[in-house]
Amino acid sequence: MTTAEVLRSQGRVQGRAEGRAEGRAQGRAEGRAEGRTKGLTEGWAEALVQVLTVRFGPLPEDVSQTVDLATGDQVQAWTARAVIAETLDQVFA
């Protein structure tokens, strides 16, 4: 094996190792970000359910399911509407 071939081989090995390390770090960062987003959404959803229950009494199952399946942006918008809405339908309009 020539010196050039040895260097090329070592470069490939080093490149792969660096690529794997970078991929793992990126994956961990993305996982943490997704976890934070999910946690915030769950917190907003719990707050919304509490506000709706206080304002309108026990919630129908379909409302609870709708809140559980919503995005963070939807839940925040509904929470803002829940403060001034006179009916559940107005919250989700």
Image (tube, rainbow, N blue to C red):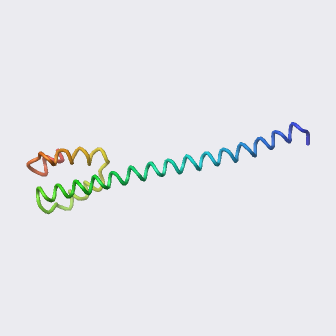
Q: Going by the image, does 32 lie left or right of 51?
A: right
Vertical comparison of 73 with 62: above or below: above
Rendering coords of residue 44 (x, y %): 28, 52
Residue drawn at 12 percent across, 45 percent down: 84
Q: Going by the image, does 67 lie left or right of 93?
A: right
Rendering coords of residue 39 (x, y %): 36, 54
The quadrant the C terminus occupies is top left
Residue 9 found in image quarter: top right
Rendering coords of residue 23 (x, y %): 60, 47
Q: Going by the image, does 10 lie left or right of 85?
A: right
Q: Nearer the viewer, residue 16 or 63?
A: 16
Residue drawn at 91 percent across, 43 percent down: 1
Residue at far top of view:
4
Rendering coords of residue 72 (x, y %): 31, 47
The mark tally for this picture is 0
Q: Nearer the viewer, residue 25 or 57?
A: 25
Residue at far right of view:
1
Residue drawn at 29 percent across, 50 percent down: 70
Residue drawn at 51 percent across, 48 percent down: 29
